[in-house]
Each structure stands twice: as C-alpha cells, then as structure tokens.
C-alpha cells in the first residue's frame, strides 16, 4: 500500500485514517522514546525522521488492538 504525496506536499497520518503500523518490533515502545524511521519515496528516495513515542495520545476508549 502507499500514499500519493505531490512534490512539496504533505500528508497527515492519524488514528482512524492513514497510519503506519510497526510489525515485528524487537522491543516495546515506551512513552518518551525516540526512534529513527526511514520512509522510502519513489522519486525523493529515502527520508529518515526522528519519531517521538507519545502514548498519551492513544485513544483511551478504544478496545481495538493489533497486538498478538
């Protein structure tokens, strides 16, 4: 799957909409952690971001989970 983002454009990722799911993590993500994420774009190539883990933004009423 992918998203089309025009040159110079932006695309918001959000709960309930387009999002990135991390599978096969070797450790749990803890609130306050930072990790590097590399996104690969068709024309721009690889872009590496530093992503903060913000568990306080979780939907506390949601019972939906992707955990095994």
Image (cartoon, rainbow, N blue to C red):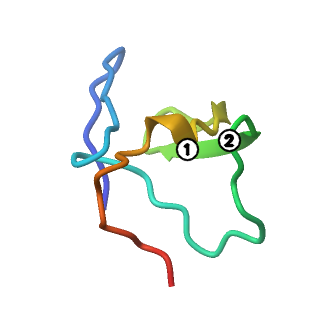
Residue 2 x/y as whole percent: 31, 53
The number of callouts visible is: 2
Instruction: Report the residue marked by disc 2.
Output: 31
Q: Quadrant of residue 54?
A: top right
Residue 56 drawn at (x, y percent): 52, 36
For image coordinates 55% across by 42% down, the residue present is 55
**Judging from the image, what secondary structure is the residue with disc 2 in?**
loop
Image marks 2 and 1: residues in contact by CB distance under 8 Å: no
Q: Is residue 6 above or below residue 32?
A: above
Between marks 2 and 1 in the image, the one whose residue lies nearer the viewer: 2
Q: Please state which of residues 6 and 56 is positioned toward the viewer in this rendering.
A: 56
* Camera-side residue of 2 and 61: 61
Lower position in the chain sequence, tag 2 or tag 1:
2
Residue identified by numbered label 1: 39
Residue displayed at 56% across by 71% down: 23
Left or right of residue 20: residue 12: left
Query: Where 68 sits versus 10, above or below?
Result: below
Q: Position of residue 57 (x, y in %)?
A: 45, 35
Image quadrant assignment for residue 26? bottom right
Residue 67's disc is none
> Where, quadrant-wise, is the N terminus in this rendering?
bottom left
| Direction from residue 56 to residue 20 in the image, left or right | left
Label 2 to label 1: alpha-carbon separation: 22 Å
Q: Is residue 62 left or right of residue 31?
A: left
The residue lying furthest to the front in this view is: 61
Vertical order, 60 against 44 (above or below):
below
Where residue 36 sits, quadrant-wise, is: top right
Q: Residue at x 30, y 29 (%)?
A: 11
Measuring 53% from the left and 46% from the top, which residue is drawn there? 40
Disc 1 crowd rating (10 Å Cα; few below 14, some 14-19, many 20+) is few
């Amino acid at each position: 799957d992918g998203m089309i983002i025009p040159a110079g454009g932006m695309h918001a990722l959000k709960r309930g909409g387009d999002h990135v799911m991390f599978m096969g993590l070797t450790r749990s993500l803890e609130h306050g952690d930072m990790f590097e994420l590399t996104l690969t774009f068709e024309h721009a190539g690889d872009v590496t971001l530093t992503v903060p883990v913000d568990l306080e933004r979780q939907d506390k009423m949601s019972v939906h989970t992707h955990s095994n």
